[in-house]
Every structure is written in structure tokens, then in C-alpha cells.
């Protein structure tokens, strides 16, 4: 129940934002229809001036009504917020959903994934409006969120190893995505790459949670700052850091390295390896399709197409960043870092779509003497997060 209560107010705020956005879409639909009608009437001799007067009256009435709807919407928001404040105390802090594949079908797990999806598509709006659904950025190990102070981290990680692996999830997900279908693919609902690596390679594995709707460069900068703070207070002398990113997560990891290198952070000196699983280093075709579709719909000056185009165009900057390679954000490969680039290949579409979302060429990344590339036939994009073969390649890579 605390999961539901904890999400109620920010979800309600997002609904009020959606009502406002809908009124602006309605306004655009009215304007587009009016341009067609008034344009036709104005072409008839003697009707141009009356048509313009009618259009002015129509615009005044329509915008007055829509403004009233927005005013009522925000009044309802204020009143309902006040009722929530009076009706019950703040719900307890949201507990961490366990890293298990069978948790994904529970209410807490389903809500967690839903919030991840919302962050992916409108996360930049959530962050700009201060909405509580914004996932922000933080780290966890097991079922515990980690503090970034020396005393708190030492208490949270009494068994911290001198080798650290940080996992970075992809677009519209949370760290729970690393457990997807694990009972079938990894042999146990509680298995995930991090836990398996801890048992096999003697590392400490952490999972990052972040708002995937923000620009890749912004998330890269935040991750660079988090890693700088983390390495500074790590309980033991850190000998090696490994970053593992799925899809967008690989780009965010590369962007963090670029920021840290440019700004002289300390943590890149211990960064030894980076694995990118299905990351669109050269962009993703479906993201480019979204951009083309938005442009095409907006180019047609019809009510339905303009509204559809505006809706598509409201997708987050994080989604838009996946269209092409983010040269300015992810930077070049770092010479002293070993890279593993993993690509899935589905039969029949591998040459065009790769793993259905990222092409093989894009996931294979830029070439280099310090780059290892692995292709996995029959593995879809989402399966790269929890797959026995991918884990074996990752474990061999982390083990050096």
C-alpha cells in the first residue's frame, strides 16, 4: 500500500499537467481547422472581411474556454493537494523492490517499472516540474540504497571489495530490468549479473537508478559526479572499476567518462573496463523513425496530423538522443580502458534491426585495439540484460 500512496500525489500532478497539455492540443486543432475554413472563405470575393471577424470571435471564445479549463484544473489540484495533506500523514518511504524476476509481477514491482516507463517518455518534464515521480539518480546494492558518505557507506558495505562493478540500465526501465525472466534464463528468480559476479569474481556490484528521460549528456555528468563521490569514500583502496551499461546505459557510461576526463575527475584512473550491451553507439533506427514521423505529421496542416505530430514531438530528450550518435556527449574511447560491445541478432531482421531496437553495426561500437565485440544470434534487445551466454562473456571480460 505504501507504494501506491507514495506515488499518488506526483501521479496526480502529472495528470493535471496532462490536462493542461490537452487544452493546448485542442487549441492547435482549432487553429488548424480555422486556417482551412477561413482560408477557403477568404478566397470568395466579399467574404474575406466577415470571415476574419468570425475567426477573431471564434478564437476569443475558444481560448477563453480553454483558459477557464486550465484555471479550474489547477484549482482542483490545489484543493485536492490540501485534502491529501489534511486527510493523512505522509506515507512511509518507499521500500526497495527486491532484485528478483518474480517481483516484477507484484504490485510494487509493476508500479516501479511503470514509473521507469514514465521517466523514459516524459522524464525531462518530471525533472523540470519537480514531480516526485522523477527517479533522480542513486545507487543500490541488494535491497538497500547507498549513502555517499564515508561512514554510511562503510556501514552499508562492510564486505566491500577492491574491485567495483556498476550496472547502468537502459531507457524507460529501472535496475529491476536486470532481473527480467531470470528464473528461466539464469536458473533462479534471484539471479542477476551483479550477484553472480560477486560470487564468481569477488567484486562488489552496485546498480544505478536514474531518470532516463533526461539528455544522455546530463545523465553522464550526474553519473560522473556520483562516481567521483563514490570512489572518494569507498571503504577500501579501490584497484579497479568496471562499468556495465545496457542500451542507453552504455551511452550514459561513456558520457560520464567523457565528462570526468574533461574535468579532471579522479575516478577514471581506476576505470579499467566498460561493457556496453546493445548500446546504440551510432543511434537507433526506431528513434530516428520517431523524429521522421513527428516531422511528417507536423508538416501536414490538418487538425489530426498536427495533434499527432505534437504528441510524438513531446517525447523526452532522452528518447530523442537515441536518434544518432551523440559525438559531443559520449566522446571517443579511452585508450587505457578495455571495452566489450555486445550485439543481439534476431533471425530475419538482424541485417536491418539487429536485436529489434539496435542494429548490429550500431551495437558493435567504434573499433579499436582495446575493443572486444560479441554477437549473440537469437537474442533480443531486452534479453541482453539477463542471458546465460551474455553473462558468461561478461564474467570472462570482468575476470580479465
Image (cartoon, rainbow, N blue to C red):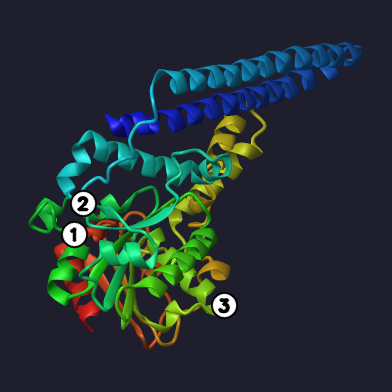
According to the picture, the residue beneath numbered tag 3 turns out to be 262
Give the number of callouts.
3
Where is residue 279? Give x, y as percent: 38, 64
According to the picture, the residue beneath numbered tag 2 turns out to be 99
According to the picture, the residue beneath numbered tag 1 turns out to be 192
Q: Is residue 172 above or below residue 373?
A: above
Whole-angstrom CA distance, mark 3 to mark 2, is 35 Å
Q: Is residue 130 above or below residue 265?
A: above
Whole-angstrom CA distance, mark 1 to mark 2, is 8 Å
Label 1: element kind: loop
Residue, x 60% and y 17% (percent of image)? 75
Q: Work out whether residue 297 or residue 45 is closer to the camera in this orientation and state it.
A: 297
Where is residue 37? Give x, y as percent: 74, 18
Label 3: element kind: helix
Q: Work out whether residue 2 or residue 262 is closer to the camera in this orientation and state it.
A: 2
Whole-angstrom CA distance, mark 3 to mark 1, is 33 Å
Q: Quadrant of the N terminus?
A: top left
Q: Residues within 10 Å of mark 3 (few under 14, many from 20)?
A: few
Amino acid at each position: 500500500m505504501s507504494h501506491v500512496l507514495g506515488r499518488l500525489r506526483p501521479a496526480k500532478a502529472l495528470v493535471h499537467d496532462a490536462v493542461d497539455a490537452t487544452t493546448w492540443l485542442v487549441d492547435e486543432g482549432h487553429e488548424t481547422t480555422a486556417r482551412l475554413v477561413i482560408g477557403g472563405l477568404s478566397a470568395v470575393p466579399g467574404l474575406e472581411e466577415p470571415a476574419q471577424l468570425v475567426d477573431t470571435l471564434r478564437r476569443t471564445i475558444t481560448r477563453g474556454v480553454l483558459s477557464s479549463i486550465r484555471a479550474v484544473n489547477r484549482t482542483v489540484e490545489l484543493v485536492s493537494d490540501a485534502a491529501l495533506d489534511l486527510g493523512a500523514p505522509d506515507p512511509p518511504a518507499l521500500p526497495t523492490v527486491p532484485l528478483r524476476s518474480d517481483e516484477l509481477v507484484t504490485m510494487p514491482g509493476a508500479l516501479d517499472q511503470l514509473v521507469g516507463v514514465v521517466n523514459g517518455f516524459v522524464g525531462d518534464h518530471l525533472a523540470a516540474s519537480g514531480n516526485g515521480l522523477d527517479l533522480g539518480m542513486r545507487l543500490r546494492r541488494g535491497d538497500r540504497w547507498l549513502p555517499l558518505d564515508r561512514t554510511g557507506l562503510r556501514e552499508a558495505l562492510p564486505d566491500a571489495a577492491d574491485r567495483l562493478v556498476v550496472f547502468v540500465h537502459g531507457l524507460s526501465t529501472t535496475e529491476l530490468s536486470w532481473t527480467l525472466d531470470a528464473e528461466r534464463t539464469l536458473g533462479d528468480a534471484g539471479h542477476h549479473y551483479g550477484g553472480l559476479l560477486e560470487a564468481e569474481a569477488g567484486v562488489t556490484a552496485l546498480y544505478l537508478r536514474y531518470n532516463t528521460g533526461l539528455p544522455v549528456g546530463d545523465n553522464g555528468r550526474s553519473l560522473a559526479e556520483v562516481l567521483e563521490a563514490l570512489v572518494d569514500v569507498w571503504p577500501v583502496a579501490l584497484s579497479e572499476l568496471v562499468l556495465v551499461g545496457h542500451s542507453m546505459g552504455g551511452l550514459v557510461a561513456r558520457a560520464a567518462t567523457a565528462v570526468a576526463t574533461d574535468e579532471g575527475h579522479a575516478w577514471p584512473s581506476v576505470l579499467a573496463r566498460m561493457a556496453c550491451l546493445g548500446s546504440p553507439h551510432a543511434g537507433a533506427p526506431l528513434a530516428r523513425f520517431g523524429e521522421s514521423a513527428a516531422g511528417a505529421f507536423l508538416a501536414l496542416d490538418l487538425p489530426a496530423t498536427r495533434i499527432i505530430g505534437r504528441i510524438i514531438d513531446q517525447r523526452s530528450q532522452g528518447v530523442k538522443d537515441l536518434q544518432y550518435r551523440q559525438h559531443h556527449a559520449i566522446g571517443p574511447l579511452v585508450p587505457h580502458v578495455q571495452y566489450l560491445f555486445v550485439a543481439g541478432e534476431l533471425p530475419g531482421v538482424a541485417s536491418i534491426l539487429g536485436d529489434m531496437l539496435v542494429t548490429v553495426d550500431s551495437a558493435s561500437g567504434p573499433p579499436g585495439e582495446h575493443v572486444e565485440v560479441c554477437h549473440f544470434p537469437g537474442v533480443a534487445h531486452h534479453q541482453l540484460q539477463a542471458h546465460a551466454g551474455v553473462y558468461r562473456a561478461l564474467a570472462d571480460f570482468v575476470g580479465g
